[in-house]
Each structure stands twice: as structure tokens, then as C-alpha cells.
Amino acid sequence: MSSETSFFSLAGKKALIIGGGQGMGESSALFLARAGCDVALVDLVPDRADAVGQKVAELGRKAFTIEGNVLDDADIPLIVAEAEAKLGGLDLMVSIVGAAAWGSLLETTAEIWDDQMRLNLRYFFLTAKEVAQSLIRRGQPGAIVGIASVDGQRAAPMRGAYGAAKGGLISLVQTMAVEWAPHDIRVNAIAPGHIVTPRLFDTPQRAEAYAASLLPMRHRGTPDDIGRAALFLASDMARYITGTTLDVDGGLLAANLFPRGLPGNNQG
Ligand SMILES: NC(=O)c1ccc[n+]([C@@H]2O[C@H](COP(=O)([O-])OP(=O)(O)OC[C@H]3O[C@@H](n4cnc5c(N)ncnc54)[C@H](O)[C@@H]3O)[C@@H](O)[C@H]2O)c1
């Protein structure tokens, strides 16, 4: 390991990755593993987690698949207990699961609202609480990383319930950070901007046109950009950082300061 990466060392640490079977969860697992961490990969689709586990093993770290559904309250204590037992301890959690429902507020039914809260906020509360209780019981310090969104920090037209849930997660992370600081547990979130994932745009052309006109860095992020941020927040490099939300958005939120469009776009 180079001297630079050793600053981020997670040697001997053990992490639970919620939604570790693909995308940002996979990248987070691989960045943590490169830093010396063993991982338990929770996913609805165990084959995906197995495939990521194979890559973790190739990096010389241990990986365990846990098949579970974090939307099922009864699964959550079982998932955390299984991770702790298989890993022989637990220090870190990175929680990725979430998704946006598309539609205006006027179209958002009570059922859609509740589903969005369950998928983006409620399970994170219950899982982080379970991990914190495990850390406190064992007298262990730890770090928890959740995934918010830029949509939780400003208006989210056509995804209002999602934006409200992610805004709730940002608030929750602050309260967890304050309440659990005496137990040496840090809690932070990452707010991705536009990250290359299959579901976000119908065509690559539309995605690239969007990126070129609206993203200051002119391209979308990759799951690895989120993995890097997860490693930073999980590591001792972030040892005095808690209760914060780190924007990983290529300048998207900052660009809201330019209502006439980005400089050079000749808009307006
Ligand atoms: N893609 C973006 O541009 C973007 C932007 C902002 C925020 N986000 C957030 O990033 C996160 C990841 O999004 P994604 O589209 O990459 O995720 P994804 O849909 O690819 O899910 C990641 C993994 O989680 C697993 N999973 C889903 N539901 C689960 C459940 N109930 N229990 C256990 N495992 C489950 C899936 O099988 C999958 O392998 C989400 O929280 C999303 O809101 C994404």
C-alpha cells in the first residue's frame, strides 16, 4: 500500500454495506476493501453480492453475502447480527439503498409518499440505530455513512417525496451525529449529483446533453466517485467530521448560483 493510501487505512475494520450488490454499493465495498476492510454485503439479490464478494476476495479481503430486505423491519436486527457474527465484529456501515418515484406533488398519493419514506429514510433510521446499538453495546467506536441526494437540499420538482425523504435523511444524520458523538460514533451522508446508473436517463445522448449544459464539470459522476467519498468519511481522515453531508455533484449545487446558465453556454 502506498503512503498516500495508508492515510485512509481501514486495516482490521469490518463494514456492513447495505445495497452492496451493484453501483455505488459495489464501489464503496471495493474502496473500503482496498483500504484493508472486510465487508458484509447486504442485497435483495444475493447473486449480485456474491459477484462483488468475489472482487473483494481478489483484493485479499473477506466478503460475506447477506440476503436481506431492509424494507422489512424484522430483517434489520437479523442482518446486523449476521454481519457482526460473520465478520467477527462491526465498525462501519455504508448504506446505499434508495430510489426516486417520478411525479408531481399533485400526483403523489399517500401510498407513494409512504413508500418513498420507507425506501429512502425509514430503513436508514432503523438500520443505523441497530448498528449504533451494537457499537455501544461492545464499547466500539464507529462510523456510519448514508446516501442523501442534491434533491434533499433544494426543490426537487417531479420527485418531491424523494426530496423530502432525502432532506429528512440529512437532518437525521445531524441528530444521530450529536446524540452518538459521546459514543465515538460518527454519522455523515453523501449527496450524489448525477451519477451514471442505468435507470436515470432513457438514452445516453440525453444524459450527455444534460451533463454538457448543466453540470459545471461537464460530465456525470461514476459510482467510484461515491466509493471514494464513502472511504474518506469512513476513514480516520474524516475523524473530526460528523453530522455533515458531502456533496459529490461535480459542482451542480454550486451552479444554482448562476440562474442564467453556466458561463459559456450562451443561455439567456
Ligand atoms: N444515480 C444517481 O444519480 C443518484 C443521485 C442522487 C442520489 N442517488 C442515491 O444513490 C443511491 C443508490 O442508487 P442506485 O440507483 O445506484 O441504487 P440501486 O438501485 O442500483 O441499488 C443498489 C443495490 O441495492 C439493492 N437493494 C435495493 N433495495 C434493497 C432492499 N430493500 N434491501 C436490500 N438491498 C436492496 C439492489 O438490489 C442493488 O443491488 C440511492 O439512495 C439513490 O437515491 C442516486
Image: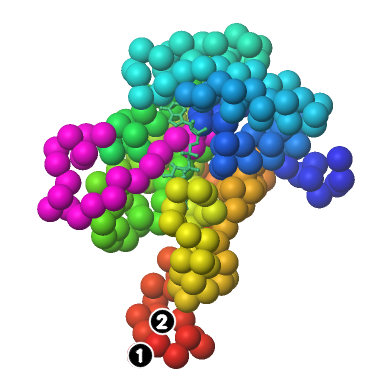
Amino acid bearing label 2 = Gly
Q: Which residue is mark 1?
A: 268
Please determine whether, in this image, residue 98 is positioned above or below residue 56.
Answer: below
Residue range in magenta is 93-115
- From the image, which quarter does the C terminus lie in? bottom left
- From the image, which quarter does the N terminus lie in? top right
List the single residue furthest toward the right. 2
On the image, the x and y values in percent for residue 215 come to 50, 70
Please determine whether, in this image, residue 105 is positioned above or below residue 50.
Answer: below
Q: Which mark is residue 227?
A: none
Q: For residue 104: magenta?
A: yes
* SS type, badge 1: loop
Q: Quadrant of residue 158?
A: bottom left
Label 2, label 1: how far apart the Cα atoms are: 8 Å
- Its colouring scheme is rainbow
Please determine whether, in this image, residue 254 is positioned above or below residue 40.
Answer: below
Q: Within 10 Å of the Cα at label 1, are there few (<14), some (14-19), or many (20+) other Cα atoms?
A: few
On the image, the x and y values in percent for residue 6 come to 80, 42
Query: Is residue 31 visible from the viewing direction of this image?
Result: yes
Q: Are marks 2 and 1 in contact (CB under 8 Å)?
A: yes
Marker count (numbered): 2
Q: For residue 118: magenta?
A: no
Q: Residue at x 51, y 88 (%)?
A: 264
- Frontmost residue, 257 versus 138: 257
On the image, the x and y values in percent for residue 95 come to 49, 34
Q: Which residue is mark 2?
A: 261
Query: Is residue 16 visible from the viewing direction of this image?
Result: no
First in sequence: mark 2 vs mark 1: 2
Q: Residue at x 46, y 81 (%)?
A: 262
